[in-house]
């Protein structure tokens, strides 16, 4: 999934990667392309994790893990960092999902359970402000429930924001007509993806 | 010339009263003014409203301040983390209030508070539960939520270097909320790893101009929260 996402990001993009599978995108940057990574706690030009023993507790990413700064990096305060996000200066954000609806709504911050402690971080700012939102997710939950749905049942993170979903079964675009298949994973049939999607899925466009 | 240089972290925070609203810089442990927080614990002011992105880790720093029961309300974006246990327990027991604010909206509310902007509109949270009850206005065909500026009585700040006038430089991603909190508090109290003579910082390199800083105190070797936690330290 991460490799497929990386292949779809143009050279020179400013990219913000969420925690988990999205982080792996950085390992699959295609030959000849360069992405500049933004982490919302105040670093543009984020590099990979340092070698063990070289961690600096004052050089971390939004997941609070130790990182490095690439040549040409810059540090800035939180209001500037979110001006980059809200102001539409970040090109691509890749993040995980609990549910995505066929009109592009995203739910990924809370199950809405009464005893849950709400914690939103920067997810709502990112999806409201970044130009292109890619979601990486397993196609269904651990118990087999569809994560691509007509309408999200979990509290929303944002409305009509997701451009494309990369799942373990397929790449699916969110279009004005709803979910449309872009590409199947090897060995997966259109029928199987339809059965595991709780909303109409349009077949891939002939091209 | 007003003397900003304080003798100790104790002197720096000793007038913080019960019921104060206090902004505390830092994102996790990066940029957290842990020595000032520990002094505030010793000082004992209670019924505090604390503004920080998180709720601290382990039983040191902000988590320890929450753990003593001195905090009535937290305003933050992400009150959980792998090492946070103090806040979740108090919250589930109904012993602490929580105002959850998206991280970018929190930053902009603080910036606005410091810049004399009473409120602003943002697309963040439109259509989500966090927009409920808030004014929505359509501008150029898109919906926006009205958010109010945030200010505080005090700010506790950590920086790398200060001069005698309170001009500040930070270290890497420890900058985070610190510069905007300096602007948004009536009294801004800074712990600096190093305090240098005025004139030693190139004006081109100043990140926070001294006008936003009231008190500075040198803490040459600040503790690292993750190290304290690894050592099993619990403050006080």
Image (spheres, coloured by chain):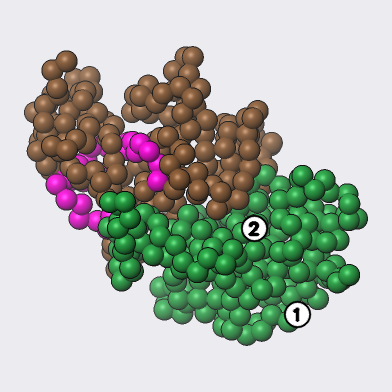
Chain colours: A brown, B green
Viewer-closest of B145 and A69: B145
Q: Which residues are magenta?
A: A129-156
Give the residue displayed 17% in from the left and 42% down from the top. Answer: A102
Q: Main secondary structure of the magenta part?
A: loop
> Residue A191's image quarter?
top left
Give the residue displayed 27% in from the left and 34% down from the top. Answer: A164
The answer to whether A106 appears left or right of B149 in the picture is left
Q: CA distance from mark 2 to mark 1?
A: 21 Å
Q: Which residue is mark 2?
A: B178
- Residue positioned most to the front: B140
Q: Quadrant of the C terminus of chain A?
A: top left
The answer to whether any part of residue B147 appears in the image is yes
Q: Quadrant of the N terminus of chain A?
A: top left
Instruction: Indicate which disc residue B14 carries.
Output: 1
Total tally of numbered discs in the picture: 2
Q: Please state the chain letter of the residue tagged with numbered disc 2 in the rendered image.
A: B
User: Does label 1 lie on the same chain as label 2?
Assistant: yes
Viewer-closest of A154 and B151: B151
The answer to whether A68 appears left or right of B138 in the picture is right
Residue A167, placed above or below residue B84: above
Is B43 a magenta residue?
no
Residue B49 position in % (x across, y down)? 55, 76
The answer to whether any part of residue A65 appears in the image is no
Residue A202 position in % (x across, y down)? 11, 31
The answer to whether B145 appears left or right of B216 in the picture is left
Residue A21, placed above or below residue B77: above
Q: Residues within 10 Å of mark 2 (few under 14, many from 20)?
A: many
The answer to whether B63 appears left or right of B205 in the picture is left
Give the residue displayed 25% in from the left and 46% down from the top. Answer: A160
């Amino acid at each position: 999934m991460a490799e497929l996402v990386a292949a779809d990001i143009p050279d020179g993009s400013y990219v913000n990667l969420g925690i988990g599978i999205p982080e792996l995108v950085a390992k699959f940057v295609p030959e000849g392309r360069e992405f500049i990574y933004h982490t919302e706690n105040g670093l543009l030009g984020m590099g990979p994790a340092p070698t063990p023993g070289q961690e600096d507790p004052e050089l971390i990413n939004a997941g609070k893990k130790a990182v490095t700064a690439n040549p040409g990096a810059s540090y800035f305060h939180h209001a500037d960092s979110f001006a980059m996000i809200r102001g539409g200066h970040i090109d691509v954000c890749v993040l995980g999902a609990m549910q995505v609806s066929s009109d592009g709504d995203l739910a990924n911050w809370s199950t809405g359970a009464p005893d849950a402690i709400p914690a939103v971080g920067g997810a709502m700012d990112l999806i409201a402000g970044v130009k292109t939102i890619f979601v990486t997710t397993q196609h269904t939950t651990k118990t087999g429930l569809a994560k691509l749905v007509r309408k999200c049942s979990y509290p929303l993170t944002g409305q009509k924001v997701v451009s494309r979903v990369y799942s373990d079964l397929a790449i699916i675009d969110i279009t004005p007509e709803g979910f449309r298949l872009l590409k199947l994973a090897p060995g997966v049939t259109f029928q199987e993806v339809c059965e595991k999607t709780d909303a109409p899925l349009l077949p891939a466009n002939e091209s | 010339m007003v003397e900003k240089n304080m003798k100790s972290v104790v002197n720096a925070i000793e007038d913080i009263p019960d019921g104060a609203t206090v902004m505390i810089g830092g994102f996790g442990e990066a940029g957290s003014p842990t020595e000032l927080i520990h002094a505030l614990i010793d000082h004992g002011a209670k019924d505090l409203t604390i503004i920080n992105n998180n709720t601290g880790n382990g039983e040191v720093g902000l988590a320890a301040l929450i753990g003593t029961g001195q905090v009535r309300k937290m305003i933050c974006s992400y009150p959980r983390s792998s090492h946070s246990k103090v806040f979740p327990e108090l919250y589930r027991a109904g012993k602490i209030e929580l105002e959850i604010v998206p991280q970018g909206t929190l930053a902009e509310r603080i910036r606005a508070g410091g810049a004399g902007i009473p409120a602003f509109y943002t697309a963040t949270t439109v259509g989500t539960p966090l927009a409920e009850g808030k004014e929505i206005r359509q501008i150029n065909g898109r919906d926006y939520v009205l958010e109010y500026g945030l200010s505080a009585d005090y700010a506790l700040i950590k920086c790398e270097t200060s001069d005698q006038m309170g001009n500040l430089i930070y270290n890497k991603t420890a900058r985070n909320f610190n510069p905007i909190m300096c602007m948004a508090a009536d009294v801004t109290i800074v712990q600096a790893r190093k305090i240098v003579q005025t004139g030693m910082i190139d004006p081109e390199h100043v990140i926070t101009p001294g006008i936003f800083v009231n008190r500075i105190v040198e803490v040459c070797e600040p503790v690292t929260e993750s190290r304290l936690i690894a050592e099993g330290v619990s403050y006080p």
